[in-house]
Amino acid sequence: MPRYFFHTTNGSPHRDEDGMTLPDIDAARREAIRYGGSLLSDDPDMVIGGNGMRIDVVDDAGQHRFAFRVIVEG
């Protein structure tokens, strides 16, 4: 099974050095959403102030697979 890394940015970057072994890209998408939801649940203010939050998902070959973004507009 491939390993996916979930690098986060919300003003300052945080690189995921451990990653997670998941069966496929669809499972990685679901995990990115769960992870983002968990971060927002712990600290909803993290997306206030224009920075938003971004999770870049990279596979074990270093290929960027997709990004998950949360922004507040208005």
Image (cartoon, helix red, strand yellow):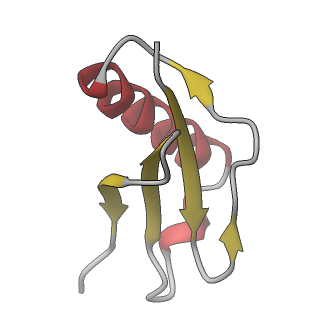
The residue most toward the right is 17
Residue 2: % across, % down: 46, 22
Front-lying residue, 68 or 40: 68
Q: Which residue is drawn at 32% across and 58% down?
A: 67
Q: Is residue 40 left or right of residue 34?
A: right
Front-lying residue, 39 or 23: 23
Q: In this view, does 36 lie to the left or right of 43?
A: left
Residue 8: % across, % down: 58, 60
Residue 42 position by quadrant: top right
Residue 68: % across, % down: 33, 54
Q: In this view, does 64 lie to the left or right of 61?
A: left
Total labels: the figure holds 0
Q: Which residue is drawn at 35% across and 62% down?
A: 70
Q: Which residue is drawn at 65% across and 54% down?
A: 43
Residue 59 position by quadrant: top left
Residue 56: % across, % down: 44, 58
Front-lying residue, 3 or 31: 3
Residue 67, compared with residue 59, is above or below; it is: below
Residue 55, compared with residue 61, is above or below; it is: below
Residue 17, compared with residue 38, is above or below; it is: below
Q: Residue at x 33, y 19 (%)?
A: 27
Front-lying residue, 16 or 10: 16
Quarter of the image for the C terminus: give it: bottom left
